[in-house]
Image (spheres, helix red, strand yellow):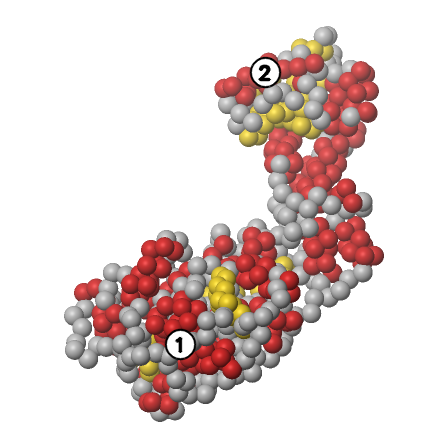
């Protein structure tokens, strides 16, 4: 068994966006110290997190060195090539791809689809021998893990057969000897775990991406290779089994093998679609056999997580149908090797938390009543209560709650504004106040101070009705040029301050001090006012930034500002307020 999970997180690249948590169909991800880590025993290796991670922090284990070492030992190494190669490499012929793989050191290349044909023959046989049952295909390892772990009531319906990859490996060993090495190559990530858990059958599984990287490193261009006469699939080319990588393909091959007409075939791809389909099975009165072809990737294996193109499904489907040759031999096929495998139940039992425990966890993030449960999904979970359960299960952290962190940042920013000796105001482009402190209200009279008491921060108030020089704010918005260290006359007083852009054309801040004093002290007072204002400008900008931020590190930013302010603020005796 390999120690590293086939899908893992590069912590240095993880950016705390929680998109993988939001997108994971089984929530097999936990947040530790702000980094999203995969829980191997809960992960079904659908590879979806690899697709959606915007930072590329979700990685697929690279097994190239393992395969190269296999080849270097001198053992005969065979390739089990997934049938989706026809859509993955549409610009080269199968023989050119075979020749390129031989250049890399493989002794022979065989189609996994041969194993698929055997699987279909076995399934057809089971369908004819049993009646009134539901059969779920075991071809996709991600689906098998998904059903056994998260929908265990349907585990007994999974066909007790090896997957096409393992069946093919068994066929190759029977024909070429037990001492050969076998490497699967395809678009699937889950095949890596399947290879890890069946080392007696297959030695390694590579993705198409790993193969492309290897070809590039060796400067091999398959399209430029002229294949030899013996560059053909061994021992034979596959036929109808080549349809397996598209949804409905497996069902088509079983129908070709099965003479029974009273069968119901259903095909579902995508784990959410499979979940919904299986949840509805209890509503069906089963009279005849039902076969459910289930593939983890929407559209089939042609859209596997490591396929080069993740769209153009119709184009890829056409490529597969066009490539799959019509059987030259009469079918139905006869099962030629035993491929039975017992599918064990390994259900994931989610912890069951009481309502009191959930409510206590919600209180940790400031959610006291039901109206506080916004269910915004910012944390990655569908509801606040699901998030609370994840907190209790140690899969989540309080910093994941966007509304909690925003409130926390706003409270700390407001607290910091209250401690500043200058009057501070932050406004939007419509000159509506976003935030201000009491010292700002005091600058403009007792009436404004009274309004402040009723509406702390004066949030939403019109700056035009409070500040006589509000046109200066408009000038900063319009021109984009800051006004630094300027005197503004308000009645019989002089207010000294600066007005500056925080977000150009969107948010502007102002820092002000009353310097109305006897003229003999005026220069000294102005100098001290300028010093204070200059020290506060950066802090106000950061505060405004935090007020609009949802980032989990807001608290550390605020703490650093508070420490900076504490070390630089004038003593009460020197305050200009």
Q: Quadrant of residue 150?
A: bottom right
In front of the other: 453 or 48: 48
Horizontal arrangement in the rendering, residue 97 relative to residue 340 (left or right):
left
* Residue pictured at 63% horizontal, 33% vertical: 544
* Residue pictured at 54% horizontal, 21% vertical: 477
Task: Name the spot of residue 311 as percent of width and height, x first.
Answer: 39, 53
> Label 2, on which residue?
472
| 202 w.r.t. 379: above or below | below
Earlier residue among tags 1 and 2: 1
* Disc ID at residue 257: 1
| 166 w.r.t. 383: above or below | below
Quadrant where the C terminus is found in the figure: top right
Q: Is residue 274 visible?
A: yes
Task: Name the spot of residue 328 as percent of width and height, x first.
Answer: 27, 76
- Point out the frontmost of discs 1 and 2: 1
* Residue pictured at 78% horizontal, 26% vertical: 455
| 63 w.r.t. 409: above or below | below
Judged from the image, the secondary structure of the residue bearing numbered disc 1 is helix
Few, some or many C-alpha atoms within 10 Å of disc 1 (few <14, some 14-19, many ≥20)? many
In front of the other: 125 or 74: 125
* Residue pictured at 29% horizontal, 66% vertical: 323
Horizontal arrangement in the rendering, residue 441 relative to residue 215 (left or right):
right
């Amino acid at each position: 068994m390999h120690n590293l999970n086939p899908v893992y997180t590069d912590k240095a690249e993880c950016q705390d966006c929680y998109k993988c948590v939001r997108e994971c169909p089984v929530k097999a991800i936990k947040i530790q110290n702000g980094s999203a880590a995969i829980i191997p025993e809960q992960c079904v290796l659908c590879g979806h997190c690899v697709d959606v991670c915007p930072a590329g922090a979700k990685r697929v284990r690279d097994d190239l060195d393992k395969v190269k070492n296999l080849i270097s030992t001198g053992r005969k190494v065979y390739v089990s090539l997934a049938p989706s190669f026809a859509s993955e490499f549409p610009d080269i012929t199968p023989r050119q791809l075979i020749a390129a793989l031989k250049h890399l050191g493989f002794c022979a290349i065989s189609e996994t689809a041969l194993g698929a044909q055997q699987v279909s023959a076995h399934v057809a046989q089971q369908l004819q021998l049993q009646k009134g049952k539901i059969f779920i295909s075991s071809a996709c390892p991600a689906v098998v893990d998904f059903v056994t772990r998260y929908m265990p009531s349907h585990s007994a319906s999974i066909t007790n057969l090896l997957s096409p990859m393992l069946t093919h490996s068994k066929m190759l060993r029977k024909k070429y000897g037990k001492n050969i090495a076998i490497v699967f190559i395809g678009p699937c990530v889950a095949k890596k775990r399947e290879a890890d858990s069946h080392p007696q059958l297959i030695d390694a599984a590579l993705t198409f991406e790993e193969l492309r990287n290897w070809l590039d490193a060796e400067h091999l261009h398959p399209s430029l290779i002229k294949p030899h006469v013996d560059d053909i699939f061994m021992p034979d080319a596959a036929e109808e089994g080549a349809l397996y990588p598209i949804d409905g393909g497996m069902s088509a091959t079983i129908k070709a093998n099965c003479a029974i007409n009273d069968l119901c075939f259903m095909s579902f791809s995508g784990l959410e679609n499979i979940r919904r389909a299986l949840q509805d099975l209890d509503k069906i009165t089963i009279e005849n056999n039902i076969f459910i072809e289930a593939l983890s990737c929407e559209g089939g294996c042609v859209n596997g997580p490591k396929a080069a193109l993740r769209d153009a499904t119709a184009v890829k489907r056409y490529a597969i149908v066009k490539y799959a040759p019509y059987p030259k031999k009469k079918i139905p096929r006869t099962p030629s090797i035993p491929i039975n495998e017992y599918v064990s139940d390994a259900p994931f039992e989610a912890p069951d938390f009481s309502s009191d425990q959930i409510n206590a966890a919600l209180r940790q993030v400031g959610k006291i009543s039901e109206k506080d449960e916004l269910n915004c999904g910012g944390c990655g979970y569908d509801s606040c209560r699901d998030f609370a359960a994840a907190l209790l299960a140690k899969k989540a952290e309080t910093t994941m709650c966007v509304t909690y962190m925003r409130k926390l940042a706003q409270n700390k920013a407001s607290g910091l504004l209250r401690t500043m000796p200058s009057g501070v105001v932050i406004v939007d482009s419509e000159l509506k106040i976003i935030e201000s402190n009491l010292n700002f209200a005091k600058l403009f009279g007792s009436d404004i101070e009274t309004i402040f008491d009723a509406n702390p921060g004066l949030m939403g108030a019109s700056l035009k009705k409070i500040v006589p020089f509000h046109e200066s704010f408009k000038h900063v918005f319009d021109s984009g040029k800051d006004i630094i260290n300027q005197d503004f006359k308000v009645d019989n007083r002089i207010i000294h301050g600066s007005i500056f852009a925080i977000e150009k054309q969107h948010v502007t801040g102002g820092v002000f001090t009353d310097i109305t004093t006897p003229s003999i002290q005026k220069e000294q007072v102005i100098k001290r006012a300028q010093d204070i204002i200059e020290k506060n400008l950066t802090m106000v900008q950061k505060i405004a930034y935090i007020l609009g931020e949802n980032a989990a590190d807001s608290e550390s930013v605020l703490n650093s500002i508070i420490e900076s302010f504490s070390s630089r603020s004038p003593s009460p005796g020197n305050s200009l307020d």
